[in-house]
Image (spheres, rainbow, N blue to C red):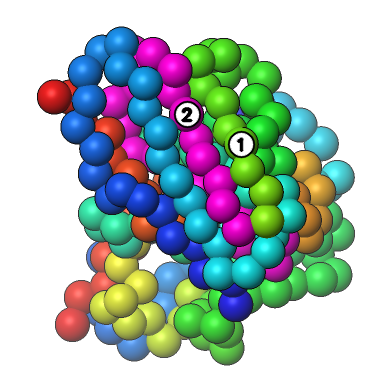
Amino acid sequence: VQLVESGGGVVQSGRSLRLSCAASGFAFSNYAMHWVRQAPGKGLQWMSIISYDGSDKYYADSVKGRFTISRDNSKSTLYLQMNSLRTEDTAVYYCVRTPGWFGNTYDYWGQGTLVTVSS
Amino acid sequence: DIQVTQSPSTLSASVGDRVTITCRASQSIRSWLAWYQQRPGKAPKLLIYQASNLESGVPSRFSGSGSGTEFTLTISSLQPDDFATYYCQQYKSYWTFGQGTKVYIK
């Protein structure tokens, strides 16, 4: 199992960024996926989950209406579209696999991609 | 929202010590609790799920216990590889993490 995030970088407050997560080594289309972030020197925060087929999506209140999770099962890729970015969105963003849906924890994590939002 | 509180936030210990970290949930989460280890610059690694089940490949010196609102992670004999930050996570209702416990070398 491998999850490789990309798309991070430095962006100005109010702008947009799209993160990608390329999955390999497992049947991507069979698994729900999450995005989890970690601000520098801080703890972990769940952001969003998407069902195996992309039909169900849920978001943390802090990003609802600004971030959109999506997936392309033909490309085994997970996405996070981040709009109206704020300085408090600065964090390492992890792509994470779950063996189930709600009521399940995570089993595999990517290495993360750093997003820095400047004022 | 279910809040999860870990203690202590830092812990100083020596190789061979028995170490215990506590996690408290703001309401009953039955056994829907996991523990993760995170080394600097790395992604978290799952150690324990369902409060007491050891993830495959994790050394048996790690153990978890508890149910309801009080949980513990115990490392029976601390090894050099174990100096890291540990997080608990509830997954009964969405997913929330504790603030983390950093284990330092004494």
**Nearest to the observer: residue A111 or residue B63:** B63
Secondary structure beneath dot 2 equals strand
| Residue occupying image coordinates x 74% and y 72% | A57
Find out whether residue B90 is within the magenta segment: yes
- The image quadrant of residue A109 is top right
Quarter of the picture holding the N terminus of chain B: bottom right
Residue topped by disc 1: B65
In the rendered structure, the answer to whether residue B9 lies left or right of residue B34 reads left
Q: Chain of mark 2?
A: B
Q: Position of residue A19 (x, y in %)?
A: 50, 60
Residue A64 is situated, as x and y percent measured from the top left of the image, at 57, 84
Taking the image as shown, residue B93 lies to the left or right of residue B34, namely right
Residue at 63%, 43% in the rendered image: B66
Q: Position of residue B7 (x, y in %)?
A: 36, 51
**Residue at x-position 86% and y-position 45%:** A30
A21 or B3: nearer the viewer: B3
Task: From this view, report whether residue A117 is shown above or below residue B14.
Answer: below
Q: Amino acid at mark 1?
A: Ser
**Mark 2–mark 1 CB contact (< 8 Å):** yes
Which residue bears the numbered disc 2?
B74
State which region is magenta.
B69-96
